[in-house]
Image (tube, rainbow, N blue to C red):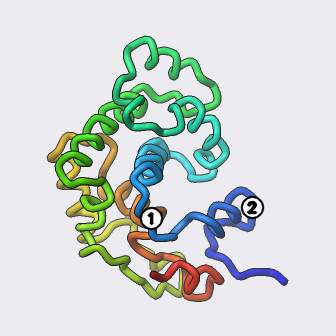
């Protein structure tokens, strides 16, 4: 039986798997939230398919997205990452990941968890949208604007409102599965 999915998967196996198992599922695990934050920053200006294809390489290159390890990366590690053909070799994004790891750890100290910090922008409950067509889905919202503004004020990099909204979609902070998608009801809290 064929499943009706969101259009963006283009029915490609890697996209289908990500869509069916991760995208839009409300996420409260700090480690996974940090991973999504890093990957969404690397995705800026690129297709999500590019990032998905390199996801395992990213995981290996960035020590399993361990924020404590990444926060300690030095110039030698940056140069090593810039030579790694398995990831997106963008110096600004690599340096942003290190910067953001340090700020992520600061937020954990301040709020007790990154989860508590990031979910405050939606009053700790997923926004459930009812989109019928992909074209109706916005690239940003008032909530992603507020998230972006606060994160930038704290010094985060690559956290513009569009990136924040993509992060919100991935982490299930918003449910942007189309109502016709078989996952729409499956990700509801």
Residue 114 position (above or below residue 109):
below
Could one spot residue 177 in this view of the protein?
yes
Q: Is residue 179 left or right of residue 118?
A: right
Image quadrant holding the N terminus, namely bottom right
Q: Is disc 2 placed on a helix, strand or loop?
A: loop
Q: CA distance from mark 1 to mark 2?
A: 24 Å
Pointer 1 and pointer 2: residues touching (CB < 8 Å)? no
Nearer to us: label 1 or label 2: 1
Residue at 37%, 77% (x, y): give it.
Answer: 126
Q: Is residue 54 left or right of residue 106?
A: right
**Residue 18: % across, % down:** 64, 61
Q: How many marks?
A: 2
| Quarter-of-image position of residue 144 | bottom left
| Quarter-of-image position of residue 158 | top left
**Residue 26: % across, % down:** 45, 70
Residue 179 position (above or below residue 24):
below
Q: Is residue 8 left or right of residue 101?
A: right
Q: Is disc 1 placed on a helix, strand or loop?
A: loop
- Judge the density around disc 2: few (<14), some (14-19), many (≥20) Cα neighbours within 10 Å: few
Residue at 34%, 37% (x, y): give it.
Answer: 101
Residue at 74%, 67% (x, y): give it.
Answer: 11
- 27 or 175: nearer the viewer: 27
Q: Look at mark 2 in the image and give the residue it sits on.
A: 12
Q: Residue 27 — which label?
A: 1
- Nearer-N-terminus badge (1/2): 2
**Residue 98: % across, % down:** 36, 31
Residue at 75%, 81% (x, y): give it.
Answer: 3
- Judge the density around disc 1: few (<14), some (14-19), many (≥20) Cα neighbours within 10 Å: some
Residue 178 position (above or below residue 53):
below
């Amino acid at each position: 039986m064929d499943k009706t999915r969101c259009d963006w998967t283009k029915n490609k196996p890697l996209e289908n798997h990500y869509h069916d198992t991760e995208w839009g599922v409300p996420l409260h695990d700090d480690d996974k939230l940090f991973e999504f934050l890093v990957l969404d920053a690397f995705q800026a200006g690129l297709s999500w398919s590019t990032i998905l294809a390199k996801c395992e390489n990213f995981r290996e290159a960035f020590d399993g997205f361990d924020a404590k390890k990444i926060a300690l990366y030095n110039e030698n590690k940056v140069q090593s990452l810039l030579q790694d053909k398995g990831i997106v070799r963008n110096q600004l994004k690599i340096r942003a990941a290190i910067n953001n790891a340090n700020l992520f750890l600061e937020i954990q100290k301040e709020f007790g968890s990154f989860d508590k910090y990031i979910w405050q922008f939606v009053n700790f409950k997923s926004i459930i949208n009812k989109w019928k067509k992909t074209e109706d889905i916005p690239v940003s919202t008032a909530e992603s604007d507020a998230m972006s503004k606060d994160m930038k004020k704290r010094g985060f990099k690559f956290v513009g409102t569009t990136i924040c909204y993509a992060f919100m979609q991935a982490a299930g902070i918003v449910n942007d599965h189309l109502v016709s998608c078989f996952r729409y009801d499956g990700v509801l809290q």
